[in-house]
Image (cartoon, helix red, strand yellow):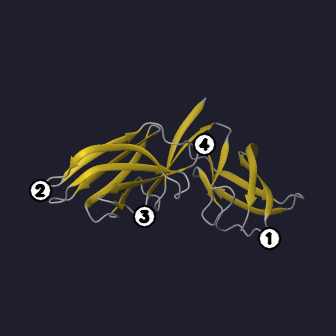
């Protein structure tokens, strides 16, 4: 049985908002049922010729996913636009930016849409960075314990949670390389995986 669950970045808010463009009153997104819903409002008195929406998984290389042709914006009042990304990239971070009047919104808005089987887990991002997390299915918020081992089997970290992720920012990795993790519920190992550390 497949379980779809949504994890929001940006300080854990369930919706993300950016004041990242001089011609926009707002640029927001939220995710539900495996789709990402984006809304932006062009300020009153601001007009443009065309608007382009871009998506990236690395926040560097962006692909055009939607565009509005012709004149946008109104002289006398703000104008709001909406777009639904029905096929976000699963199990990774999706970053979104808008190009309007030759200016790109910055910083991007970001969201993770996870699609994991009941006994699956994933590390995002992997190789490990300071903000990496191990995500797993935990709809019922059961207590879970994660153990991280070095290549030679030495236990280097243990953590507990009732959330659907373990944060790795407190793990003291001695060196770059491959590490292994196991996650237990009710003293039974139900998922495991590999962490790659390149600090």
User: Of label 2 and label 3, which has the lower sequence position?
Assistant: 2
User: Of label 3 and label 1, which has the lower sequence position?
Assistant: 3
Looking at this view, name the residue that lies furthest to the right.
Answer: 152
User: Of label 4 and label 3, which has the lower sequence position?
Assistant: 3
User: Of label 2 and label 1, which has the lower sequence position?
Assistant: 2
- To which residue does mark 4 refer? 137
Of the 4 image quadrants, the one containing the C terminus is bottom right
Crowd class of label 3 (few under 14; some 14 to 19; many from 20; radius 10 Å): some
Q: Closer to the camera, 45 or 16?
A: 45
Q: In which quarter of the image is residue 90?
A: top right
- To which residue does mark 1 refer? 174
- To which residue does mark 2 refer? 75
Mark 3, secondary structure of its residue: loop
Q: Closer to the camera, 130 or 155?
A: 130
Q: Quadrant of residue 65?
A: top left
- Residue at 65% across / 64% down in the picture? 129
The mark lying in front, picked from 3 and 1, is 3
Mark 1, secondary structure of its residue: loop
Instruction: Residue 61: give x, y in percent of width and height.
Output: 53, 54
Instruction: Residue 158: give x, y in percent of width and height.
Output: 74, 61
The mark lying in front, picked from 2 and 4, is 2
Q: Label 2 vs label 1: CA separation?
A: 59 Å
Looking at this view, name the residue that lies furthest to the top.
Answer: 1
Instruction: Residue 149: give x, y in percent of width and height.
Output: 81, 58
């Amino acid at each position: 049985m497949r379980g779809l669950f949504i994890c929001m970045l940006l300080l854990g808010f369930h919706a993300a908002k950016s004041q990242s463009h001089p011609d926009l009153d707002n640029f927001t997104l939220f995710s539900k049922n495996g789709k990402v819903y984006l809304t932006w409002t062009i300020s009153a008195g601001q007009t443009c010729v065309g608007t382009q929406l871009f998506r990236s998984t690395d926040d560097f290389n962006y692909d055009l996913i939607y565009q509005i042709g012709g004149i946008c914006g109104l002289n006398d009042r703000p104008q709001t636009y909406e777009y639904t990304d029905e096929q976000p990239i699963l199990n990774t971070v999706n970053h979104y930016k808008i190009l309007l009047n030759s200016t790109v919104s910055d910083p991007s808005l970001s969201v993770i849409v996870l699609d994991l089987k009941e006994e699956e887990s994933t590390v995002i991002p992997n190789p490990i960075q300071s903000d990496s997390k191990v995500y797993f299915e935990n709809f019922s918020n059961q207590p879970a314990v994660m153990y991280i081992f070095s290549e030679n089997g030495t236990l280097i970290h243990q953590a507990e949670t009732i959330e659907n992720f373990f944060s790795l920012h407190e793990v003291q990795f001695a060196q770059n390389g491959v590490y292994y993790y196991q996650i237990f519920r009710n003293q039974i190992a139900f998922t495991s995986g590999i962490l790659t550390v390149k600090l």
